[in-house]
Image (cartoon, helix red, strand yellow):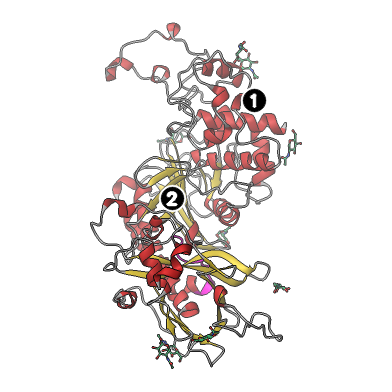
Amino acid sequence: MLSPLLPLLLCVPLVSCKCSDPSPAFPVPSWTKQHKDDSLASTFHAIDTALKSIATDDQYDTTSFSVSLTSETETLWSHHHTALKQNATRPGTTHIDNQSQYRIASITKVFTTLGLLYQHSAGNLSLDDPVSDYIPELNSTSAIPWKDITLRLMASQLSGMPREGNWADLATTPFDPTSVGLPPVDREDLNLPACFDPEVFESCNWTQILPYLNNKQPVFAPGQKSSYSNVAFELLGLVLARVTGLSYEEYMHESIFKPLKMESTTFKTPESDEHAVLPLGQFFWDVDEGIHNPTGGIYSSSADMSVFLRYVLTHYNALATGVNWFMPASWTGLRSFYGMPWEILRTERILEHSNRPVTFVTKGGAVPSYFSRITVMPEYGLGLTLLVGGESSILEKIQGAVTIPLVRAAEGLVWQDIDTTHSGNYTALDKELNSSITFAASAATGLEVTSFISNGTDMFDTLLSTYAQLLGIPKEAAWRVQLTPTLLFKNETSQEGEIWRMQIVRERTEDGPIWDDFCLVDVDPVSYAGEPLNEVVFWHGERLVELSAFRRGAVDASNPRYHLGHITILAQPNGEERKYSPTSEEPAHTACMRHNEQ
Ligand SMILES: *[C@@H]1O[C@H](CO)[C@@H](O)[C@H](O)[C@H]1NC(C)=O
Ligand SMILES: *[C@@H]1O[C@H](CO)[C@@H](O)[C@H](O)[C@H]1NC(C)=O
Ligand SMILES: *[C@@H]1O[C@H](CO)[C@@H](O)[C@H](O)[C@H]1NC(C)=O
Ligand SMILES: *[C@@H]1O[C@H](CO)[C@@H](O)[C@H](O)[C@H]1NC(C)=O
Ligand SMILES: *[C@@H]1O[C@H](CO)[C@@H](O)[C@H](O)[C@H]1NC(C)=O
Ligand SMILES: *[C@@H]1O[C@H](CO)[C@@H](O)[C@H](O)[C@H]1NC(C)=O
Ligand SMILES: *[C@@H]1O[C@H](CO)[C@@H](O)[C@H](O)[C@H]1NC(C)=O
Ligand SMILES: *[C@@H]1O[C@H](CO)[C@@H](O)[C@H](O)[C@H]1NC(C)=O
Ligand SMILES: *[C@@H]1O[C@H](CO)[C@@H](O)[C@H](O)[C@H]1NC(C)=O
């Protein structure tokens, strides 16, 4: 069997089998009303109980918060908490709801970057232009190599420029530096622009700050390593203003807030306190951030942020040619990355039944008394808004209390649904042929092929095991044939003909060799007669599965999809529907292992 396949298969990169759990593993679920009222309801109930318990802690007496979860189409669940203690003279809203307004601080960077993507797409600028093309005041007199710093590097926290322009210099803060061990300084001797006033946040303007920036030192060479920068986004706001001829704030309003109908979203302090979240002791609500607006100036509500997240969830790969907005740009840790300007966690520690990584695309924000984070879960089609007014430490508690049970419940439901819609034993329409294929779905193994007979030949004994061997999987090692969705359809217009690819996946072993973690993805290794050998197409309407490369021979004139030669289209099943319950015992990984024995 080996010899005829060798010439074809030898070109396969030997490492392509190592990824133990392909991700994404399923098409983006569309969360229906039934999910919301039925299966997810108990999860939301448990999360509500957990959040109530967190909020009862005395340290959060002055803390209010809003949490809201949206699918691609609608808000699925929300939870609002009003602080026990509020300012008697100026309480702001006394009933937190989805209209309540918070400062969202650095989440503003996501909006600034979206504006940048729009302008890139319109051809008004290029992400790969140096910032000095738009801000010539940043020039060669500086130690910072402005001409090598592109807009893309700035939006990706890879510019290497300093964190701040005129913020965060302790010498300008009102406290006595000597009380914390810093040497005394004479403000008059400082080489700081006169506008550095600790009490007034909008005090500096660009005329004063640009020459000062030229005097600063770089943190890293451009593109070398990532480090958080606020001033990078302030400069991007200036670029947007110069390119569009509008003020930055007007441009955000015209290009984002207005089209998305985000009516509670603004850079100006809302005129009325009716919806204002004003935690006791806050002093930042009324601050006009001035030139800092592009890095952290927005006020918004959880309802508006959910609208925004729905837009992002459905457009992230269609905003500008060559840009998938959720992709990382640099790593910041083992499991964390900076995107543009997203803060991404990709962890294999969350799912209970597999090591498949789950990706959280987030952006956080913090200004005094206001802490926030949006979290997009693109694989699940979910977006979470978390807005806090009060104590910062509650944010991580809520983040964990919501996302972990949510993702685990969503994962269970996904496989329950896929088991219903995809699993089963499909046999050839042409009853003359001894051809059949069986799919099974579980949270542990994803959607996998558990048997595959083609015209009397067991494919696990021939092509599949030969291929596994050529991928470098030792004979004694366990592997399975898992399906990974391409998210493409044979008919994109009608969204019919859902295309998946079979992949040979080695079962992950605890404490395997270090290089087992080295995963290169290749889902298109080999074709047969011009068709991808591993392509599987589900035609749900007809309950049919099509194996593209096995589609030889005559076409049935009455239906061009029915090729009558080989396996062609296989009809669903004789098997009954099986239900997967996330709490039940996981099926053992035996099916393929048995097939793998030779
Ligand atoms: C560099 O820019 C500063 C303002 O930011 C300006 O004062 C200076 O003249 C410029 N120098 C050159 C060489 O263009
Ligand atoms: C910036 O502030 C300085 C000092 O107040 C003022 O002279 C200058 O006109 C301002 N520039 C702009 C562009 O507003
Ligand atoms: C491109 O810039 C011009 C002004 O420079 C502006 O009129 C136009 O609206 C911009 N295009 C978009 C799509 O924003
Ligand atoms: C309460 O609000 C008043 C009026 O804005 C303000 O002067 C005072 O400092 C606030 N007190 C606290 C503890 O936040
Ligand atoms: C806000 O909450 C109200 C009351 O629960 C609800 O009717 C409304 O649909 C919500 N709006 C949004 C945008 O979520
Ligand atoms: C699938 O169905 C065919 C036809 O009934 C049968 O021959 C085959 O054994 C079945 N395969 C499995 C795994 O049940
Ligand atoms: C179909 O092929 C399989 C694999 O070769 C074989 O085990 C099975 O007996 C065949 N079934 C029939 C009905 O011939
Ligand atoms: C794709 O679907 C659309 C809408 O249902 C239909 O009009 C069209 O004929 C389909 N295209 C093909 C190639 O089947
Ligand atoms: C099935 O196998 C037989 C021989 O084993 C072969 O003659 C025939 O062409 C095959 N048919 C298809 C559709 O693969």
Q: What residue is drawn where x is 54% and y is 66%? A: 527
Q: Please identify, in this view, whether the residue under mark 2 or under mark 1 is nearer the observer.
A: 1
Q: Does residue 528 appear to the left or right of 136 in the view shown?
A: left
Residue holding disc 2: 65
Q: In which quarter of the image is residue 249?
A: top right
Q: What residue is drawn where x is 45% and y is 68%? A: 5
Q: In which quarter of the image is residue 567?
A: bottom right
Q: Mark 2 is on which residue type?
A: Phe
Span highlighted in magenta in the image: 23-34
Q: How many marks?
A: 2
Residue holding disc 1: 133
Secondary structure found at label 1: helix
Residue 42 place in picture, x, y as percent: 39, 70
The residue closer to the viewer here, 385 or 570, is 570
On the rendered image, what quadrant is the C terminus found in?
A: bottom left
Position above or below: 54 against 161: below
Residue 517 place in picture, x, y as percent: 33, 53
On the rendered image, what quadrant is the N terminus found in?
A: bottom left
Q: What residue is drawn where x is 38% and y is 55%? A: 15
Q: Earlier in the sequence, mark 2 or mark 1?
A: 2
Q: Mark 1 is on which residue type?
A: Asp
Position above or below: 113 against 326: above
Q: Is the magenta stretch mostly helix, strand or loop?
A: loop
The residue closer to the viewer here, 564 or 252, is 564
Q: Is residue 185 visible?
A: yes
Q: In which quarter of the image is residue 18?
A: bottom left
